[in-house]
Each structure stands twice: as C-alpha cells, then as structure tokens.
C-alpha cells in the first residue's frame, strides 16, 4: 500500500545506540508535559513528542541516512557490474 504524503512509520536505528549522546537525549521523555484524556492517551502523546525530537536529532546529527544508503547501494552495483564485465582488479573505483 502506497502511503504518499502520510507519515512513515517510526523505525528505531540500532546505530543510534553507538552515539554517546543518544542515551542523554532520552531525557526528552521527562521533558514532555503532555496531558491526555487518560493515561494511555498521555503515553501516546509523549511517544509522539519523543518521536519528533528523535527524528529531528537524527536529521541534524546524521543527515539523510536513507539517501546516503541508496547512493552506496548504487556504487556497489556499479562495482559489481564492473567486476562481471572486466574481471577483478585492484583499480576498481
């Protein structure tokens, strides 16, 4: 199903845990002062707030990682085709 302009699902990136400041950033959870209709709604609002802060931090800290990943995959395919067509070489770019 194509989502178009709808929000993409939030995906936790494991490499965030290797970033020394990531755990400190989870203090954002305590900073959230959302109050919902009940405890579950309050929890949902807090998660939504935290998600937005993590997404902004990720973009500011690492840039567009998905675009970078796509570029790397294109380079890998190019090298693979070069190996198929020309054989292995230490001069592969």
Image (tube, grey):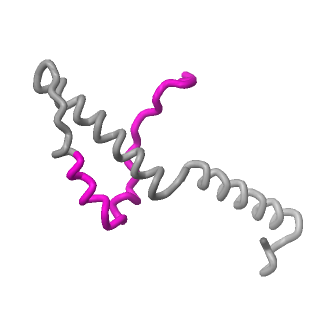
Taking depth in this image into account, of 34 and 74 the one nearest to the observer is: 34
- Can you give x and y, in whole percent of width and height, for residue 49 in the image? 29, 36
Point out the image quarter for the C terminus. bottom right
Helix, strand or loop: magenta stretch: loop
Q: Taking 16 as reference, is 35 above or below it?
A: above
What residue do we see at 22% from left, 35% from top? 46
Task: Give the quarter of the figure containing the N terminus.
Answer: top right
Residue shown at 34% from the left, 44% from the top? 53
Question: Which residue is situated farthest in the right direction here?
Answer: 86
Q: Is residue 6 magenta?
A: yes
| Left or right: residue 82 compared with residue 4 | right
Q: Nearer the viewer, residue 49 or 83?
A: 49
Q: Furthest-bottom residue in view? A: 90
View extreme (top): residue? 37
Q: Position of residue 17 (x, y in %)?
A: 33, 60
Above or below 33: residue 64: below
Closest to the observer: 30 or 70?
A: 30
Indicate left or right for 45 with 66 as reference. left
- Asked if the magenta segment contains residue 37, the reply would be no
Tell me which segment is drawn in magenta: 1-28
Residue at the image position 24 percent from the left and 59 percent from the top: 24
């Amino acid at each position: 199903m194509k989502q178009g302009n709808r929000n993409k699902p939030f995906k936790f990136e494991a490499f965030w845990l290797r970033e020394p400041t990531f755990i400190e950033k989870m203090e954002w959870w305590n900073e959230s002062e959302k109050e919902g209709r009940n405890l579950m709604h309050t929890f949902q609002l807090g998660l939504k707030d935290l998600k937005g802060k993590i997404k902004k931090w990720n973009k500011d800290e690492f840039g567009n990682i998905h675009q970078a990943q796509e570029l790397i995959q294109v380079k890998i395919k190019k090298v693979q085709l070069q190996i198929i067509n020309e054989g292995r070489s230490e001069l592969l770019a």
